[in-house]
Image: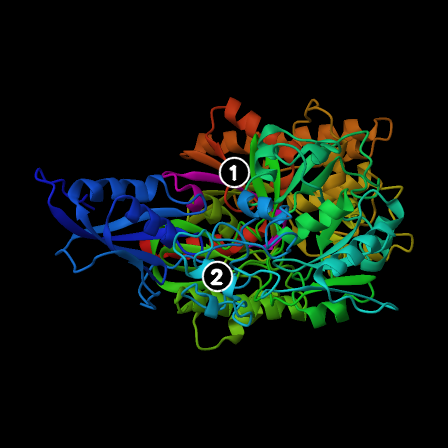
Amino acid sequence: MADVAHRADDDISAARITLAGHVQGVGFRPFVYRLANEYGLQGSVQNRLGEVEVVASGRASDLVRFQRDVIARAPPLSRPAVTAVETIAVPPADRFEILESSARADAKIFVPPDYFMCDDCREELRDPGDRRFLYPFINCTQCGPRYTLIQALPYDRANTSMANFPLCADCEREYRDPADRRFHAEPVACPNCGPQLSFEAGGQADVDDTNDALAAAVAAIRRGSVVAVKGIGGYHLVCDACNRAAVEKLRRQKQRPDKPLAVMFPVEGSDGLDVVRRHVTLQEAEEALAAGPIRPIVLAARNPDSALANNIAPGLAEIGVFLPYSPLHQLLLDQFGGPVVATSGNISGEPVLTDNVEAATRLKNIADGFLQHDRPIVRPADDPVYRRIAGRMRPLRIGRGSAPRELDLPWQQERPLLAVGGHMKGTLALSWDRRVVVSPHIGEMDSPRSLAVFEQIAADLQSLYGVRAERIVCDAHPGYTTHRWAQRQGKLPVEPVWHHQAHASAVAAELGHPGQWLMFAWDGVGLGQDGTLWGGEALHGTPGHWRRVASLRTFRLPGGERAGREPWRSAAALHWECDSAWPGCPDPDGLAEAAWRNHINCPETSAAGRLFDAAAALICDLPATSFEAQGPMILEALCRAPAPAVELPIKTESSGLPRTDWQPLLSIMANRSLDRATRAEIFHSSIATAILRQAERAREERSVDHVGLCGGVFQNRVLTEQVLGLLEEAGFDVHLPESLPCNDAALSFGQAAEIAARGVSA
């Protein structure tokens, strides 16, 4: 790329400047227009399906400053990059104008996520003299929905779900004025021409006035009701977070007895977090993210004197907190005047609901009332979730505001592909050239609605980005819904990737460090190359070239998948494996043990996640759970400080694979003379030390440039921070993923990365 030349005589010059990156849906064209007029330039700016092309003429010195400032002063939501500068003949122009978007199909498309309400719109929302005073759908070029209302590109109003809301004269004037901050703000609207609220509750007359509907919803929440609120990317189920009976009602009606519930707080104070701080203790990194543009759910330590209902997150020390991110949520919290539970409006495990009729039907036994609006949601986007681990905020779920998430690959993708992820925490990835676009969280892939949303997003990603997949990549497990879907597509070749190789390649590709990796891939279960259920693996190599170099001692899981929600089965299996008795075993008729001894529905596993389940059953007296990872989460919450570790021996099996033996922990986990916290601390310290010992042994036998930690087990902050500390003290260069979750949400990206790397090495 060459800068526009600065001529000594400063004659009139002209250039064609092409910019790519985050330049759509972020007010970039009006910014360029204003900047060009500031420097007295003539010409035009045009959207070209993902790129922006600027043709500008003027004094050479002004062109140089313009090119500099088009990057340096770009709107805060944009991330432009100049990809080409071409000196051209001076065009016949007497002004600078914004041209209609071009649908040229070979451009670098960027689909923006949904954005939180900006400060300018928040001021107008609260200004009685503004025509958008208290309007729940206020927005501008710097805020508002994008991903959830875009139907096609280029990003123009006719291609969004706002197409059926004709602009009034005042909005039309703003929309057409390049000097206005609502110039081509595609969702722009006002109370006279835009979406409206309504409130419906059984036994009451429907409320169709927007202000009255909001007031009726707030009154219902104050009475202890559960209200389904339609937001930007889907519904929330909302109730008073300080009312224990209301929270219990929500849990009972949603059949969600224990899973923690997220809490949304009113905005107060200079950074908006004053009310939040009354209930949780926020570290600096947590504050920055909670008040930042993504507005995710942030896990934070609950204060002992918090007035939140004690059944918000039973047995856990942290609460998921977040601020309102849309004007509707802002108004709801302002009027209610306190924190509310705001959990996903769905049937547990499914994608969040988006359609008014479907929500009213499927949530009728959960919600007492419905605060609806008439702007269609094109596709769902659930709230993202982040947790501070090792000093940094790490995503546990990507969604509204943080996805679609685009990453670059270190390798060129030979042919465009669609990577369909795993079975839990589903995401999709579309990959071509060196690009990978990862979808927002979809959900667990075991329901018809999950599959329907999955198929919609698979089609939408290809349509929006103008890329048609030529192959499909899936997890190797033949029982996964996504695997079976891939095989049914028929016309496209399908390439399977082993579960833990995808985990490993996701971290290596995201970070892009050259050299040999030692990747600890620890999770619940995933099918391994030997037909057993892996989940406590150490893989060595690079994407496309992974080799298992260590694992955990295996045991057989009585009941197979049932063990995931019945931790006692893992605990019992550990005892039976060691020919020892467990007096408290909840298998009174001996059927599970008989099945185990006869190898009936008892798959073999090396999964660390199931080892943590067993520890939770033994230490926390938790024979059964109501949500995934409940046992390990409660086990982690018990820990106060690192404890002395029990050294776990490494035994090499006949194949030459070293396996860490967990048996020495069995007596400690069941030792009731020690309090629960002490046993939990010893367990975590021992497992962390076991990882260190495996890493030391691997380094003795082969080159190790970097160590990576991936898989859902490393969502555990106590374990992960101990592992990091031990490994770094021993001289290892250790990494965790930062842009994507370490759990199965990263599998789609890892699958795409693994295939790209194989293509390079083929």
Q: Is residue 231 magenta?
A: no
Residue 478 shows in the view: no
- Left-right relation of 480 to 562: left
Residue 468 point in image, percent of width and height? 40, 69
Give the number of the mark in front: 1 or 2: 2
Per the model, the C-alpha gap separating discs 1 and 2 is: 38 Å
Residue 663 point in image, percent of width and height? 71, 36
- Left-right relation of 631 to 408: right
Q: Residue at x 10, y 45 (%)?
A: 11
Q: Residue furthest right?
A: 588
Q: Amino acid at mark 2?
A: Glu
Q: Establish if 472 lies above or below 621.
A: below
Using the image as rendered, state which of residue 662 and residue 271 is in the foreground.
271
Q: Residue at x 87, y 45 (%)?
A: 244
Which corner quadrant of the image does residue 717 belong to?
top right
> Where the C terminus falls, by quadrant?
bottom left
Q: Earlier in the sequence, mark 1 or mark 2?
A: 2
Using the image as rendered, state which of residue 649 and residue 682 is in the foreground.
682
Using the image as rendered, state which of residue 53 and residue 234 is in the foreground.
53
Return the residue at label 1.
736
Which corner quadrant of the image does residue 359 belong to?
bottom right
Please give the range of residues in magenta. 509-528
Q: Establish if 33 lies above or below 733.
A: below
How crowded pointer 2 is (Cα within 10 Å; few <14, some 14-19, many 20+) is rated as: many
Q: Amino acid at mark 1?
A: Leu
Q: Is residue 526 magenta?
A: yes
How crowded pointer 1 is (Cα within 10 Å; few <14, some 14-19, many 20+) is rated as: many
Give the SS element for disc 1.
Answer: loop
Return the residue at label 2.
186
Which corner quadrant of the image does residue 636 belong to?
top right
Q: Establish if 729 lies above or below 131.
A: above
